[in-house]
Amino acid sequence: MAQTQLKTPKGTRDWFGPDAKLRRHIFQTLSGVFEAHGGQELDTPVFELRDILSGKYGEDSRLIYDLEDQGGEICSLRYDLTVPFARWLATNSNFTHVTRYQIAKVYRRDQPAVARGRYREFYQCDFDIAGDYESMITDAEVLLITAEAFEALNIDITIKLNHRRILDGIFAVAGVSPEKIRPISSAIDKLDKMPWDEVKKEMVKQKGLAEDVADQIGVFVRNSGDMRALLSYLQSNSKLMENYDIKSGVADMTLLVSYLEAYNVADKISFDLSLARGLDYYTGLIFEVITTLPDSKVASKSKKQEVQAGSIAAGGRYDNLVGMYGKRNIPCVGISFGVDRIYTILDSRLPTKKGGSQPGPAIDVFVVAAGGQDDGLLLELMAVLGQLTKAGVRTAFTRKAKPKLLPQFKVAKRAPITVMLVPDDLAAGNVRLKVSSGKDGADEGNSDYNEEKDRGKLVSKENLVVEVKKLLQQKRYDLEDDEVEGSILWTRQPL
Amino acid sequence: MAQTQLKTPKGTRDWFGPDAKLRRHIFQTLSGVFEAHGGQELDTPVFELRDILSGKYGEDSRLIYDLEDQGGEICSLRYDLTVPFARWLATNSNFTHVTRYQIAKVYRRDQPAVARGRYREFYQCDFDIAGDYESMITDAEVLLITAEAFEALNIDITIKLNHRRILDGIFAVAGVSPEKIRPISSAIDKLDKMPWDEVKKEMVKQKGLAEDVADQIGVFVRNSGDMRALLSYLQSNSKLMENYDIKSGVADMTLLVSYLEAYNVADKISFDLSLARGLDYYTGLIFEVITTLPDSKVASKSKKQEVQAGSIAAGGRYDNLVGMYGKRNIPCVGISFGVDRIYTILDSRLPTKKGGSQPGPAIDVFVVAAGGQDDGLLLELMAVLGQLTKAGVRTAFTRKAKPKLLPQFKVAKRAPITVMLVPDDLAAGNVRLKVSSGKDGADEGNSDYNEEKDRGKLVSKENLVVEVKKLLQQKRYDLEDDEVEGSILWTRQPL
């Protein structure tokens, strides 16, 4: 047998320590915003019956991971979180109005592009509002949430949006036959990455569209920008406005812009008539979030690592997906956040990791003993540690049976508080409490402790937890660089 | 084609709202305890190269879910979190001492027993300390963490523990041949569920052990209880103490009991010589956590639903697992928490869910408008809502374009604070702030607001966020039943 390869499967990776902590920061920020809008959490199994996923993803279905038939049900790993939500809605008919979020991994057997943050296993973070609401009220709320989420993450964005019925209407007016609308739509969607000439070539040469039809489409879809201006432009074209889909879409968008202005997020919006979105199931509003500018820090960090985040969130209205399961229908609108791309942006803002040294955990107190197993001080130390950890204080010691004093102090420096155990003090029921003088050696100026700087302050064992908690509540004794400017830093030294 | 079955795959389920919230409460409680002991988070892919899992689980390997061979690598879903951690340790040789935790789903194609909380997809919550430490120091810390975790979860426990080398030594002394040690060990492990006679029958009839050998084993393994007493019992038997494994194991356990006493958790321990644990990879301390008594509330809730939680956490020392990958070795000790069983226990303590009504989200503020789309009040409402949600205040409205006043007030009652929009007030730049009088209609006695009880207090739009936050900081205006006696309650009414 060949030797076992020691690696994660292609397109997947492990997350540890600070990396996992930064990702958790993203999850917590997003779920906080979702819960501010009444979002409740949903968790679904990582695999679904294969039939549930069938016919939902068009040609991307080939990217679905299948489980082996081991006798029993035929299952596949979920491809996104929208279809499992639709399945859940179709099944749980007692829910008529649901605001749910889900943060979970999805799976796509795509060609991974790890440097650009594209993996085969990656997190999605979805927020959706399901229920029969009046036109654009929940659509506007989803866009408000989008703006709030990126504000909370400290990422500048533009939300590009369009309306499926306006886009399809333009195709129809230009003379595209119904069966060609989706293929032409997917060609148009590439206009953000390709020049018009190439998109036109794809439509004419590959998809058999008449050249004059392609040109007519080009006149309309190359418009983008301010919503009110673009709505006036569409409304002034009577040929377009005779089309029922366009007329309805324009009415929707007119209502939407007033809501977005009320929510004070209209400045983040760009109405983009070429935005099409790949997925078949959208029926109304569609949108995509892009970062307006690559962060200057990102670009300067390393040219090779320059972040090409592309779309970092996307969504839209899908009024018929739940109905596809045949039980009942319920209209939905929602957004999916690309956590890994957001992670790449936030990570690029952190100071470059120092090679070699591994990150350590965040610790409040380090316990040091002037003795060990032989003189009973190890047991004294354990008693003190247990007191502190039971009270939720993050506490560490060398985990050695007979530790030497100097190496203990060397590690203890990295924690804001040191507790010292000395035989004479212990005999009198006391320990010593010492506040770290800060990473750069600068004095923190807490006179109470500095007076007895070297030996620390005597505290009775009974009062230790209370005293430590008091110190920790004075924020400056906590790890001060835990949070900086909305992103996260941490000690990168090992304990 | 047959109609799509609308359900989750066998042995899996969805988690929504309060259920997901209770589970998150468990995760957060456990990770808080882990972090208090320097634990850092690890996340690994849900599937591993199949070779990584091979030969790690003995006969349970048949329960592994395989991914279909779709061209490319051959993968399987993870069966536990220990093997992925060992794979990670084997790969990342820059880490010599790691304290890590992982909270993630694992997969077993076992016969599900949903009523007893046994699923095919379920969460594990693992904490492990890897590194070459002196005898029993980290073992004791893992047991301290176990005690702290269940204390924090408000669950009474007993930790049954044993030592593989003592158990194997007893088998050897009794005359069990080396190749029969694991099969006999797995028979002995059933002593907590089966009477001795049946276990003996299995050993003699099925596994071909001589009857006198079985009887000798029986004399020893049916001992359990106080650690110091049992250690004396073993030490007084010179035949046993001549065995090198037993002698080493007894030395380990003697050290351990002193550490556990220092940590003040010895009262939770039962030394149980019949505890064997199924997994092959344990090399020293093994342990299992059981709830001491079924909660009285659990039993009374419903006889059918009576919780048979069995073991709710388990672990031990595995010093050779990482070395199996041939790159390097690193000794480890750890514990795995059975989240679903813990969930079942905590859920059974909640008041019975009222049939029919669906749980709603936790909301701080409900915004009510005396008007709608036609008179501009919908836009005013949206502006106010956006102000509040941007500040992180959990805010809801009816999401109707032209809501009637009375139905709005009916829903608003469920939130602690109501903001009212009335045209005359708005013209002067004001809104009205009203504090809910509590669920049972009892007066909360906040005179400032009660004076103007019906109409609320006038607040300028600019000051609204500050005023609302001030009210929310007065805890009693938050949803008061959010936390009760260490467990969680919530409003079970829909918004």
Image: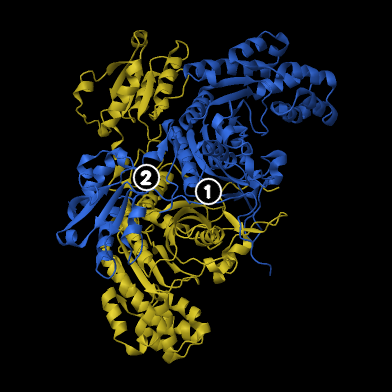
Chain colours: A blue, B yellow
Task: Label 2: state its secondary structure.
Answer: loop
The answer to whether B173 is drawn above or below residue A432 in the figure is: below
Are there few (<14), some (14-19), or many (20+) residues within 10 Å of tag 1? few
- Residue A37 appears left or right of B250: right
Point out which mark residue A355 bears: 1
Query: Whole-percent x and y of residue A464?
Result: 21, 51
Q: Indicate the quadrant where residue B48 lies.
A: bottom right
In this view, the residue in front, B309 or A107, is A107
Question: Three-letter amino acid code at disc 2?
Answer: Lys
Q: Residue at x 43, y 53 (%)?
A: A494
Nearest to the eye among marks 1 and 2: give it. 1
- Residue A142 appears left or right of B249: right
The answer to whether A431 is drawn above or below residue A267 in the figure is: below
Query: Whole-percent x and y of residue A491?
Result: 42, 46
Determine the chain carrying the residue at label 2.
Answer: B
Measure how far apart labels 1 and 2 are at the Cα level: 54 Å
Q: Residue at x 37, y 62 (%)?
A: B142
The answer to whether B123 is drawn above or below residue B463 in the figure is: below
Query: Whole-percent x and y of residue B218?
Result: 38, 84
In this view, the residue in front, A293 or A97, is A293
Q: Which residue is mark 2?
A: B353
Residue A43 appears in view: yes
Question: Three-letter amino acid code at disc 1?
Answer: Gly
In this view, the residue in front, A264 or A318, is A264
The answer to whether B135 is drawn above or below residue A450 in the figure is: below
- Residue B118 appears left or right of A179: left
Position of the C terminus of chain A by quadrant: bottom left
Q: Residue at x 41, y 50 (%)?
A: A361
Position of the N terminus of chain A by quadrant: bottom right
